[in-house]
Image (cartoon, grey):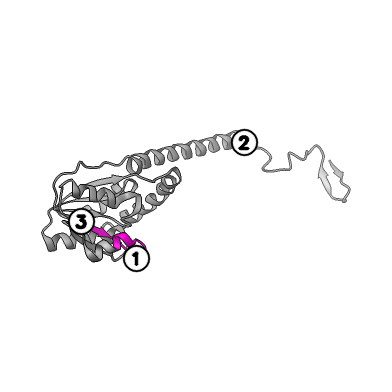
Amino acid sequence: MTVSRRDGSAQPAGQSLADRTPVSRLSARGRRLLLWVVAAGVVVLLAWLSVCYVVIVKPATDAPVKVDAVVVLGPPDANDRYDEALSLVRAGYTNTLVLSAVTTEQPALYDICLHGLSGVHIHCFYPQPTTTQGEARRITSLAAQYGWKKIIVVTSAFHVSRARMIIQRCFPGQLLMVGVRKGIGLTQWAYQFLYQTGAYAKAFLHPEC
């Protein structure tokens, strides 16, 4: 049996508007599937945040010892990387300081690269490419040139784990990592969770030195 609508078309008797809406209700199976998808997403998110916390916020670092050189990854003025490295030199761990990616936008450090620093052997370089991998290659080249067997590398805390992995692929000697945290706010930590995740993916896809 059919009934006529105002537009003249026919509608089966007893069919409600809800019955004619295919997405009006999820079946019990559909609801269970949706819950599983949401739960899986939450688990993945929590796992990712946990890994980021361990690797990026609380990375493994090393106690400084006497080394052949202290290397500051670029930009050396970020998060007081240079100040931390200079304090290691002043503390007597080495008398050789290496600065990466110094530009004219860092006039004080640029002046040090040009004119040196009293009592300290200064080496400055600009990596090619301008990546941690480029820095690792240049550090290894300098180490071979000057006979460095043991170095301390200073960088921001969020960069420590990835820098260690990449530099170890190139540098055959003993590598100690020191991380600095000054000036890293909540917004930057959040950004670094995303940035370092992508950078790790790139590093795993290109495992060569």
Image spot of residue 1 (x, y percent): 84, 41
Q: Is residue 209 visible?
A: no
Amino acid, disc 1: Thr
Amino acid, disc 2: Ser
State the residue at coordinates (63%, 37%).
26
Left or right of 5, for residue 99:
left
State the residue at coordinates (13%, 47%).
66
Image spot of residue 196 (x, y percent): 37, 50
Return the disc, 2 or 1, that comes first in the chain's sequence.
2
Give me the C-alpha separation between circle 2 and circle 1. 65 Å
Does 109 appear in magenta? yes
Helix, strand, or loop for circle 2?
A: loop
Give me the C-alpha separation between circle 3 and circle 1. 19 Å
Image spot of residue 162 (x, y percent): 30, 50
Q: Is residue 58 above or below residue 99?
A: above
Q: Which residue is mark 3?
A: 97
State the residue at coordinates (25%, 66%).
114
State the residue at coordinates (23%, 65%).
115
Does 26 appear in magenta? no
Residue 27 is tagged as 2
Please tell me how crowded label 2 is: few (under 14), some (14-19), or many (20+) other residues with Cα within 10 Å.
Answer: few
Q: Nearer the viewer, residue 160 or 182?
A: 182
Which range is magenta?
98-110
Left or right of 128, for residue 174:
left
Left or right of 54, for residue 38:
right
Q: Which residue is mark 1?
A: 104
Q: Is residue 92 above or below residue 40?
A: below
Give the quadrant of the C terminus. Answer: bottom left
